[in-house]
Amino acid sequence: ALQSLPSEVGLLSSLELLRVPMNSLWGLPPEISNAHNLAWLALSANPLVSRVKPKLAAPEIATKRLSLSSEGANLADPEFGGAANDGVVPALLDAGTEAETKVAVKYFRSGLGPDGDPEDEVLIGAALVRHASATDHPAPVKQPEPGELGVCEQLCEQFGLARWPRLSTVIKLVEDAAPLAKKPIDTVRILRGRFETEQVPVAFLLGVAADVSSGLAFMHSLGIAHGDVYAHNLLVRKDHESPIEEPAGKGGDGPVWAKLFDFGASFFYPAELGEMVEAVEVRALGLLLRDMADFLLVSGQGDEPSPEKAEAAKAARHLGEIANACALKKPPERPKISAVAHALRKLRDEGSDAAAKALPV
């Protein structure tokens, strides 16, 4: 196991992704801040971050309460456990009432995830949806009052951990949804999203941008990094037109267009790493926004001018400006995630002039 990283990591100017979970790291070299292209960082299950984890046990769910929603088999069946592939399958959760909750069950190979500790993943998922208290959340940004924070609608809700026949997490199922984009299939843009639909409404994509930034800002308000901000980790409606959820009441922030999911690379971080970790994640968000802006430009191309194409070009320009601010070469000069989220909500609700005032670029 690695006990330290060399200072030369700061010389890797092209380094974009660094995955070092489940090692013995007690610190990071200061020079890492010079790796200004770094956008995805995973540090789960290292002493550096484990020391600030909340003193909570990941909630556990008895396997007998789960059954496959398609085949009708019980997940506790050893034959199913031996034959199932790694990945996510739909299931039903017996909540002890007449109604059953539709869930997704995510399995892990040999009790390990590719980006971190599955138990940490569940713990973080549970921490994000429970009412936070100042005693069990080491938030570097602000200490929330007991009961101040509840469910964040822009994040997928995790119910708990199932251990048999295979280690897995149980997640609330978002029906009729799919990732915003697929993973790349070539090595040229291996860290970028792959949009397959030809065109989406501008309002839809601006809603998605606002939601992912709001979900990310919520995580960082608790001192939690997502670590895997990609278009393929955003759930949206398959029709790329409808919101996932409508506002539940008068106090809501409008429709929910996207939910950020997959906390496999997520980790709690100590206050002394707050600025560095947030700047890294802001760059990842900026790259995602740049992909969205480029997609709007491509989908708005054509021979005949139209109001729709003009609207797409204008939205792409302002998304691109915010993306550029998020990807500034010097990490300390990048905006805070909360400021980006505020600007994107303004862009969604009030247009480009309001966004420019919220985040001058």
Image (tube, grey):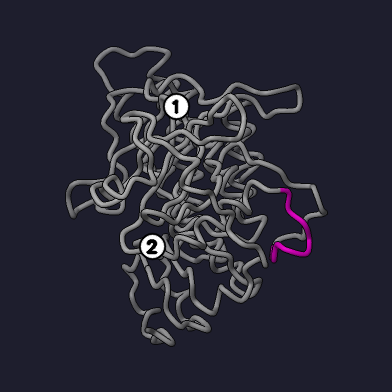
Mark with earlier residue (1, 2): 2
Q: Give the range drawn in magenta.
A: 131-140
Q: Does the magenta stretch include residue 355?
A: no
- Circle 1 sits in a helix, a strand or a loop, which is it? loop
Looking at the magenta stretch, what is its main secondary structure? loop
* Residue 130 placement (x, y as % from top left): 68, 48
Answer with the quarter of the image where residue 95 lies.
top right
Residue 74, position in %: x, y?
38, 39
* Residue type highlighted by circle 2: Asp
The structure residue drawn at horizontal position 59% and vertical position 24%, both measured from the top left corner, is 98
Identify residue for label 2: 115
Query: SS class of the residue under badge 2?
Result: loop
Which numbered disc covers residue 165? Answer: none
For the residue carrying disc 2, how many other residues have a C-alpha within 10 Å: few (<14), some (14-19), or many (20+)? many
The answer for how far apart the CA atoms under marks 1 and 2 are is: 26 Å
Q: Which mark is residue 175?
A: 1
Taking the view exactly as shown, the residue that stands out farthest to the left is 186
